[in-house]
Amino acid sequence: MSTMPHTFFLPRYVHLTSGCMARPHRTVIEKVIPYQEKVLRDEVPDAPSHAIENFRIAAGESSGEFQGMVFQDSDVAKWLEATAYSLMVRPDPDLERRADEVISLIGKAQLPDGYLNTYFILTDIEKRWTNLAECHELYCAGHMLEAAIAYFQATGKRELLDIMLRFVDHIDSRFGPEEGKLKGYPGHQEIELALLKLYELTGEKRHLDLASFFIEERGRQPHYFEWEWEKRGRTSFWPRFRELGHEYSQSHIPVREQREAVGHAVRAMYMYTALADLARITGDTLLWETAQALWKDVTRRKMYLTGGIGASAFGESFSIAYDLPNDRAYNETCASIGLFFWASRMLRKEIDAEYSDVMELALYNGILSGMSLDGSRFFYVNPLEVWPEACRHREDLRHVMTTRQKWFGCACCPPNLARLLASIGGYYYSRSGSSLFVHFYGSSNLTIEDWGVTVEQETEYPWDGEVKLSVIAREPREFTLSLRIPGWCNDFSLEMNGEAYTSTPERGYVAIRRTWNGRDTVRLRLSMPVMKIYASPAVRENVGKIALKRGPVIYCLEEVDNGKDLQALAIKRDSSPVARYESSLLGGLTTITAEGVRLTADDSAAPYHTTPPTRSPAYLVFIPYYAWNNRGEGEMRVWIREE
């Protein structure tokens, strides 16, 4: 398999036509982006934001004080980025006009020297750049830079891009290895990956150099965060921040020496994303080895079955290997989104289904679970087991919301979901030289203008494993079409224009090399049985339990289908689970049913007995994990005892 870098298509070239992923994509465009705009404009009761108002005050168009988190600007940035992707796939002059108005405000808020951050502009400009460890200036800059690039690609308009180029110039004048510049780097990584995007847009090496500096300087001695802490009089912005240590921001040792994922999971994901990009762009083999080592640590020792990462609520952080509790799991939605981004960059460097499998796993489970089916409510954390009564009373479960929320004081996740799901079509396909790769399956149309080729994909995936691809070439065109064979699929078949086609997967992809002409049809059939998943005994909470998976989708039990006390249920070892598509349930999805048992004690309220509980037959109903909590509050669990 070629290790040449691959390029994904901009979302404008991929139209999702129907199916499981097209629904949340459409929901984001039609409902979520407008809803989030109203939140940012403070037009939704009980969901205060003040984010746009902060820019209005900084621009001199309103009066008042800064409100919100120190990183409140990033909510606006991510909404603008999501809006850009929405405009790519569905032009909307009114939405574009409103976005332009927000961009104009941002420009008016920018200081003459290029600096842009409403928190410091409105509170104390003299304190800017004095607390990189805690105050998110470079993080906000990175998100606004990503938005600027996306908006330029969507509309051709340069206003936001020019604003951010001035800000990047300001940052470049302040930070770097040169004499007289600060040797600092962001406490929350993000600007690194944005600068690498900017480099690929502009080709200006100084943007690459600045991104490289932020990565290479991190964790070196003398430690910058210690230096700035001393310089500002040993004061901290966040209570208990010093308790987290430098592992929290992955600055405990130089990046090239890191082999274990530690600290804040989202920070780690954004840094690893930039690390993979930098290795691809520069060809630095040692950086790539670092990225691969970290990948193995995360995906083989610290990742949940759902693609969730960051088990610990304290510091929203990774725990030790195999410490993957179900009810206390943090699994921030942003962390799974970050994992998706990182995997996509690893895939750009090197085509291997190991990366696209993780993208798909996170997407269909730990990411989609972060938003209600109607797009109006959101989860910040995504545990694998919920007992609502305990969550309301236990301190160690206080982070677990038992229902999705309209918004959050720290609202990083909703706009992050919006920008990913609005752009999701752009991850379905990539190309390199004369090769076209299909990474995701879902009904869609891809247009490759310079090839004169259109690819039409028809499928009910992930509920059905049959995929039909029609390749329409205006003129004869020779290229290789490579299709991902997911790691969960143990059997597949392939047809080319009605004839059986044999190809051996290489790194999880089967290749068809031919001259395509007119309309050619490829049919891929992926076996999709219900699978019982067993955890390693090292995962202590899941010993003696199983989970169900079909295709890329992880399943769970929910109280609404199975009654209370889900912990009292067990699945029979000899049970043969049955999958059935139900078009009228939760927008249409496949459920799994199985034979099980329910344990009951005698009528005594005593917690302990000298006789075993009574076993009675139970009919178990499993739904996709992402769809839970769309029918009211109740218990949920992914892992169930097997007996």
Image (cartoon, grey):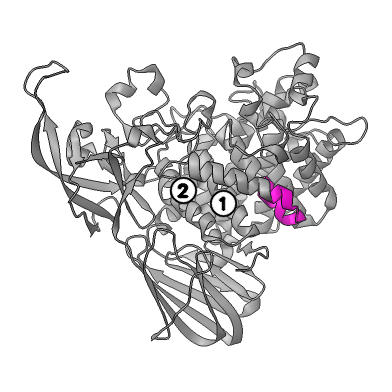
Q: Amino acid at mark 2?
A: Ala
In magenta segment, residue 363 = no
Name the quarter where the C terminus is drawn. Answer: top left
> Which numbered circle lies on residue 413?
none
Q: Which residue, as the protein is rendered here, is positioned at the far front?
A: 537
Residue positioned 49% across, 40% down in the render: 301
**Residue 495's x, y, as percent?**
41, 81
Q: Amino acid at mark 1?
A: Ala
CA gap between label 2 and label 1 equals: 10 Å
Q: Which residue, as the protein is rendered here, is positioned at the far top?
A: 233
Q: Left or right: where does residue 57 sit relative to residue 557?
A: right
- Viewer can see residue 414: no
Q: Left or right: where does residue 211 sit relative to residue 506?
A: right
Work out whether residue 77 or residue 210 is closer to the camera in this orientation and state it. 210
Name the residue tied to disc 2. 362
Quarter occupied by residue 139: top right
Name the quarter where the N terminus is drawn. Answer: bottom right
> Which numbered circle lies on residue 343?
1
Residue positioned 39% across, 17% down in the render: 395
Among the two numbered marks 2 and 1 on one chain, the one whose residue lies closer to the N terminus: 1
**Residue 412's x, y, as percent?**
54, 35
Q: Secondary structure at mark 2?
A: helix
| Magenta region | 274-288
